[in-house]
Amino acid sequence: MAKSGLASRLYRGEAGLNIVGRRKLWFAVAGVLVLIALLSFAVQGFKLGIEFAGGNSFQVPASVGTLDQAEEKVDAALAAKGGDAEVVTAQKVGSTSGEYYELRTSQLSPAQATEVKAEMAREFGINADQISGNQVSEAWGQQVTSRALLGLIIFVAVVAVYLILRFEWRMAVAAIVSLFMNLILTAGIYSLVGFEVTPSTIIGFLTILGFALYDVVVVFDKVQENTRGITANNNQTYGEASNLALNQSLMRSLNTSVVALLPVGGLLFIGAGLLGAGTLKDLGLVLFVGMAVAFLTSILLATPLLVLMKNYDPRIQAHNKRVLARRGAMARGELAPKGAPRAAEGGDEPIDAEAAALAGSAPKVGARPAGKRPTGARGGRPSGGGGNRPGGGAKRR
């Protein structure tokens, strides 16, 4: 017989992935990563785009040379007329009127911007009217940030209400913690690597929240299915049933994440990397990093955190103790496993005395109640062998 595949073994809980049982390890790793991210926020901070930090933007025709050559000449113009200003970002942008280079610099005064524009025209050997420039205030970026925070608060509130109504409050807490962990780790990667934060980055952050929520809901739905009525039997603890749900939904979550990451990876590595579409870089970066982190947090953090909170529920605590006590009795030979043969019938396992007594005293299915059979006209046949049988009654005279 051919061996079962990984997906089948995961669904049956035979793959041996004890994710919930190692929750202390995942919590420790998550705590270390959060600490690194917070230190990066405090020490290194973020590389803000001119929409948030303020600055100037210049557009020059792509016919002046390569992007590197254009950046070098703008740096020379800034060194000559712009004081301490420097080029922050440079990218190639296409439009209906043709391709051009957009070079963003740090803040310049109106007089400096005019002088730098004239110096750039001299460096490139073109007319000054072929170079366009504008100044961007940081107030616009602050407005975008405040709107994004408002959207985040509304999103979290709606998600909490939905999860409480759909599942329970513990699942809502675990899902929201997973969402914030996703945001913190993604922002930490941005801070450590030095990715530029733009309005597209903010939009991407709000987008990955929906993907992370979908992943968590898929796992929690399977957890709820596996743990429904779990206290009615003594076969599994709550953590074991939740771990089985993780194994059963792992392949689905992995396939969903891979399918989602493929087009985002194409957008990032092909569109922004090979083709030079710089406007796609910021959005592609945050989506790719955020979706990858969302898969990990939904598997390694959300469900283990849920199990940790459920284990403080007195009803679940009592159930887990019953399961462990039953297993201990079976290990000591005091209780036969369910379906094991009796010792008198050739079985090796001893029989629980209490269970045997209850089994012996219980009536068999379909058996009549024990006790004296009633007699008389209402309860059974009439005495004297009468009744409706032919010849059974007294002869008439």
Image (cartoon, rainbow, N blue to C red):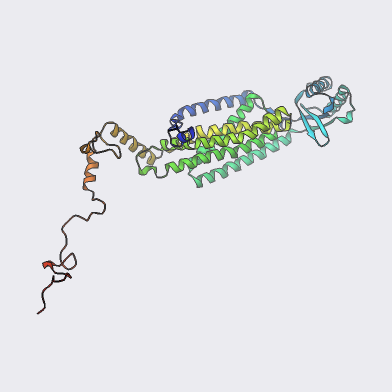
Residue 153 visible in the displayed image: yes
Image quarter of residue 44 = top right
Q: Is residue 299 above or below residue 229?
A: above
> From this viewpoint, which residue is outermost toward the right?
127
Is residue 83 rendered to the left or right of residue 205? right
> From this viewpoint, which residue is outermost toward the left?
397
Is residue 183 rendered to the left or right of residue 369? right
Is residue 221 rendered to the left or right of residue 257? left
Quarter of the N terminus within the rendering? top left
Is residue 237 rendered to the left or right of residue 165? left
x%, y% of residue 148? 65, 39
Residue 311 visible in the displayed image: no
> From this viewpoint, which residue is outermost toward the bottom?
397
x%, y% of residue 357? 21, 43
Q: Please state which of residues 281 and 14 is positioned toward the viewer in this rendering.
A: 14
Q: Please state which of residues 272 and 262 is positioned toward the viewer in this rendering.
A: 262
x%, y% of residue 331? 29, 31
Image quarter of residue 337 = top left
Image quarter of residue 151 = top right
> From this viewpoint, which residue is outermost toward the front?
1
Q: Is residue 65 above or below residue 143?
A: above
Quarter of the C terminus within the rendering? bottom left
Q: Is residue 10 above or below residue 169?
A: above
Total marks shown come to: 0
Q: Residue at left 54%, top 43%?
A: 160
x%, y% of residue 23? 46, 30
Q: Please state which of residues 69 and 317 is positioned toward the viewer in this rendering.
A: 69
